[in-house]
Amino acid sequence: MRTPRIDPPVTPAVSPLTRMLTDRLGTLGLRSGQILLALLLASVLVFALVQLKLVVIPLLIALIIASAASPVLRWFRSKGLSAAVSTWITLLSGIIVFGGVVTLIVIAVENQFAELAEAAVDGIEELQTFLVEGPLPIDQAQIDEAAAGITDFLTSSQFGTGALAGVTVAGELITGAVLSVVILFFFMKDGDRIWSFFLSPLKGERLARGRRIGTTAVSTLGGYVRGTATVAFVDAAAIGIGLLVLGVPLALPLAILVFIGAFIPLVGATATGILAALVALVANGWGVALIVIIIVIAVNQLEGNFLQPVVMAQSLKLHPLVILIALTAGTILGGITGAVLSVPIAAVGWAIVKVWNAPTALAAPAPPRRKKR
């Protein structure tokens, strides 16, 4: 009996193009093309957002403030107030507080401006004397030449163009502020309904993911802003009290600047501390300026080692290198405003990545529906 012959399996013919695309070099080329395409799309998106910054920045500011105010709104609604009434109370209270702070700053600057201007003149004369008679190789002719260059710039057409550009920027700031208040009102009043509208086409796991993202974004932004505001208030109070005790002029405006600077991690507190030390140097001399520097360093150390880890908790778990990169990118794209917004945006992005594929059971529940009246 003869053994039947088994023919070897027929290997389908592979075209040269398929072979070229599926070998190691072809796979690497395809992946590189995909990465370049993703980078191109991201660049186009960032470029479009920068061009629309007059709308994008107020939108982001309103979103962050609304997230920070969400516990207050929930408390008002739990007391039986409607969404519109809760929003008006919260928004008007914030505007009154902000307006009061600005009024105090203006009064403090007006009362102490003449004294600070006179001290600044004396400080500049002392600095000029130190530069001429000190160990640095600088003579009076070099100082006069630098002063003449500054005077020429201030009287040039280039400076006038810059002043006109400053007027344009001021107009954009006013427009952005008004737009931020309007958007903030609607976010505070109908934020959950707006997000539900965007999620309405989704079903199943995609809908659950959308709810996770919304809940995580609001929680992270709100926790970041509230925690940073608490830390900033402690810093501003401690440094402001120190400036008042030492008799440094403009202590209240400087304390407010310390509060604002705390919203820019790593560099904000340092920059405002240096500014406070410079004012103390001009108005009070080297000894007081050195004490101010010691106070700023001590407050920053207490904040970084004790207060911030407790207050911020889970709100911002980013490596300092990530924060530095986010600050740099935000500053390049949006200036000071971009520096303030970049870190909370990076924190929200990382929080969303962590919950993107989280089990539905671990996701936060959807916001409760309002009771019909």
Image: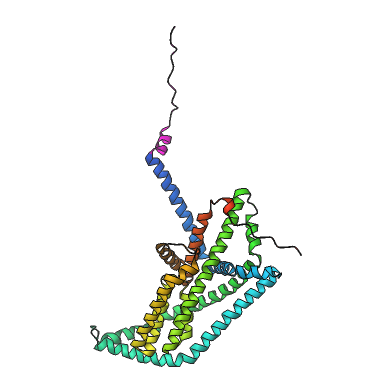
State whether the magenta stretch is mostly helix, strand or loop: loop
Residue situated in front as seen by the camera: 150 or 326: 326
Residue 48 location (% of width, % of height) = 51, 61
- In the image, the segment drawn in magenta is 1-23
Image quadrant where residue 115 sits? bottom left
Q: Which residue is rendered at x = 69% and y = 70% of the image?
A: 79
Q: Which residue is rendered at x = 62% and y = 48% of the image?
A: 204
Q: Is residue 108 magenta?
A: no
Q: Is residue 42 above or below residue 152?
A: above
Which quarter of the rendered picture does the C terminus lie within? bottom right
Image quadrant where residue 2 sits? top left
Q: Extreme right residue here? A: 373
Residue situated in front as seen by the camera: 146 or 32: 32
Q: Is residue 20 above or below residue 104?
A: above
Residue 321 location (% of width, % of height) = 39, 63
Q: Is residue 14 magenta?
A: yes
Which quarter of the rendered picture does the N terminus lie within? top left
Q: Which residue is rendered at x = 41% and y = 82% of the image?
A: 276
Residue 199 seen in the current view: yes
Residue 128 location (% of width, % of height) = 30, 88
Residue 177 location (% of width, % of height) = 57, 74
